[in-house]
Image: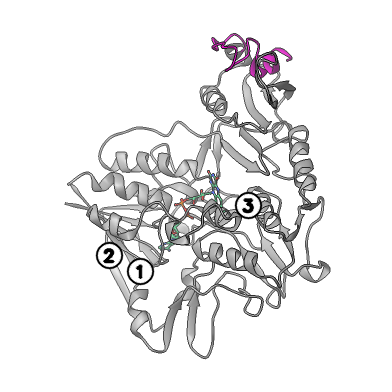
């Protein structure tokens, strides 16, 4: 029986383990640094919004269910070293610490009195307390009292995910600060939301997490300001025409937006708490220089089968590179949508089934104060910045046939294309009605390198109450 060891038991690690566990030729061991598996980031926000009422319902699986599949899941087991020559890993057995009276593992939530230091690991000197408040850094938790264990592998899958970026700001320790990534951050956010002493919150960063967190906190009555160093929110996902709708919707709900505002010191901002939402960086602390990484993003560089440069070593999910079908280069996407695909491809390859990854185009969506935005591919801004010859066709239309439908809603669409070839480069949509299903069509079109002509005359159904004869997609394509 071949031993497959997977490092990291969140979406990608669990998914790979479950696929492999169905094959009796493999013994699967899943090592997880923290004490929780299958946390969906958005659940933290749904908990704040009151949509999730019972936090024990968070996560779509649990250790018992995973173990019942024959997977050897080891929680509180951060891997600290990889040995590619002897095909082994070293991990810390933090479970052994729980019985030690001098050292304890805690999952306490922070408060205004006990803010989380950068890196998310709180150290209490009287009694060594390791707080998994944010992503765990194996270097920080290396403690001489912790027993280490070694495990051999035939195949190794790295599913170590990503960690939130922290601002290069000194002296944040006297402030109430937090990131939004894992279950413990989620608990801290709920604690913050419920704390009447915290009236005003500064969200540093206007990407997906910043905007969604701002919405949730404004919803529970906090005075929220988003500080964004760029000239718009959700840079890289939407161009200015579509994003203006989001800006307006946030302002209508009293979320303040400070654009072109780089935060260099927390002391300059009047707020009771600060959320760091600056994006994510691939968590690739393991493997040193022996494992190839993608230069800028620093994620593990993988081929179309999720293989790294080390034999029998794969990387999946947020820690791995993706092939970008628009730029036709390796890139980095920290998106949950990549996790199951990459897990399946790696698991298949280990089983001897060669199904290559066809590349990604970054399909994504967000729903803020009922404004639903989704996009795929690249924006016009990004295309031009990359030196591509590109343009965009933007149009606004009624979603359904005006004569038949009451409460019709508007839909905004922007189609980005290469001017020399008419190749589709990206699509952005916004509406109060959910039109996100149509994004799959565009995702496929971009993956396959289709041009506007392929879509302009596409056979789309007509039905008086369901779709217009000449709908917003066709209109946007024909405006070109
Ligand atoms: C608030 C929030 C909302 C989001 N919403 C969306 C969304 O709507 N759509 C979308 O597509 N994506 C979304 N994402 C992104 C999505 O959650 C990630 O892409 C996804 O979690 C990546 O899964 P992963 O398993 O690859 O990595 P992670 O979720 O980062 O998990 C990595 C796991 O590895 C463990 N680990 C790390 N190092 C070690 C080690 N040395 N030893 C052992 N274990 C280790 C970690 O503890 C962790 O459990 C959201 C993220 C957040 C934070």
According to the picture, the residue beneath numbered tag 3 turns out to be: 209
**3D distance between C-alphas at marks 2 and 3:** 36 Å
Disc 1 target residue: 91
Q: Residue at x 71, y 43 (%)?
A: 235
Is 270 rendered above or below residue 21? below
Which residue is at 66% across, 30% downward?
A: 429
Q: Is residue 457 covered in magenta?
A: yes
Residue at image location 57% in from the left, 28% down from the top: 439
Q: Is residue 114 left or right of residue 260?
A: left
Earlier sequence position, callout 1 versus callout 3: 1
* Mark 2 nearby-residue class (10 Å; few <14, some 14–19, many ≥20): few
Does the image show residue 235?
yes
- Crowding at dot 1, Cα within 10 Å, few <14 / some 14-19 / many 20+, comes out as many
Residue 207 vertical position relative to residue 243 in the rendered view, above or below: below
First of labels 2, 3 by sequence position: 2
Q: Is residue 384 above or below residue 130?
A: above
Q: Are marks 2 and 3 in contact (CB under 8 Å)?
A: no
Q: Inspect the magenta stretch and tell me whether residue 48 lies in it.
A: no
Count residues near mark 3 (Cα–Cα under 10 Å), then give few for <14, some for 14-19, many for 20+. many
Report the magenta residues as a range. 456-480
């Amino acid at each position: 029986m071949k031993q497959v060891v997977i490092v990291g038991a969140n979406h990608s690690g669990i998914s790979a383990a479950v696929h492999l566990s169905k094959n009796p030729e493999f013994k699967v061991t899943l090592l997880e640094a923290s004490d929780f598996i299958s946390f969906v980031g958005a659940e933290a926000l749904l908990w704040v919004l009151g949509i999730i009422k019972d936090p024990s319902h968070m996560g779509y699986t649990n250790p018992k269910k995973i173990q019942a599949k024959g997977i050897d899941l080891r929680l509180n087991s951060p891997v600290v070293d990889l040995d590619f020559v002897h095909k082994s890993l070293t991990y810390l057995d933090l479970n052994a610490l729980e019985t030690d009276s001098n050292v304890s593992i805690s999952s306490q939530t922070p408060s205004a009195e006990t803010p989380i230091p950068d890196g998310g690991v709180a150290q209490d000197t009287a009694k060594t307390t390791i707080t998994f408040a944010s992503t765990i850094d194996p270097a920080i938790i290396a403690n001489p009292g912790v027993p280490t264990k070694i495990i051999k592998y035939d195949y190794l899958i790295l599913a170590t995910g990503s960690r939130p970026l922290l601002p290069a700001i000194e002296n944040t320790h006297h402030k109430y600060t937090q990131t939004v990534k894992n279950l413990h951050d989620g608990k801290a956010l709920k604690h913050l939301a419920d704390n009447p002493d915290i009236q005003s919150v500064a969200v540093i960063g206007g990407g997906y997490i910043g905007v969604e967190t701002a919405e949730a906190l404004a919803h529970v009555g906090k005075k929220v300001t988003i500080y964004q160093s760029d000239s718009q929110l959700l840079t890289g996902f939407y161009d200015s025409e579509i994003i203006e709708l989001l800006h307006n919707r946030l302002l209508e709900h009293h979320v303040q937006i400070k654009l072109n505002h780089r935060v260099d010191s927390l002391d300059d901002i009047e707020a009771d708490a600060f959320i760091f939402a600056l994006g994510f960086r691939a968590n690739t602390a393991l493997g040193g220089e022996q494992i190839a990484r993608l230069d800028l993003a620093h994620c593990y560089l993988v081929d179309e089968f999720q293989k790294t440069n080390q034999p029998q070593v794969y990387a999946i999910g947020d820690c791995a590179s993706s092939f970008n079908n628009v730029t036709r280069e390796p890139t980095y996407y920290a998106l949950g949508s990549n996790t199951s695909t990459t897990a399946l491809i790696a698991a298949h390859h280990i089983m001897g089934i060669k199904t290559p990854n066809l590349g990604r185009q970054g399909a994504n969506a967000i729903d803020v104060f009922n404004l639903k935005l989704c996009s795929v591919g690249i924006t016009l801004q990004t295309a031009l910045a990359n030196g591509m010859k590109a343009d965009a066709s933007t149009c606004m239309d009624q979603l359904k046939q005006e004569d038949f439908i009451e409460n019709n809603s508007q839909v905004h669409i922007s189609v980005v294309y290469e001017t020399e070839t008419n190749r589709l480069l990206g699509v952005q949509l916004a509406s109060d009605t959910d039109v996100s299903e149509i994004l799959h069509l565009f995702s496929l079109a971009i993956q396959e390198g289709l041009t506007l002509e392929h879509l302009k005359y596409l056979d789309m159904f007509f039905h008086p109450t369901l779709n217009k004869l000449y709908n917003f997609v066709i209109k946007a394509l024909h405006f070109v």
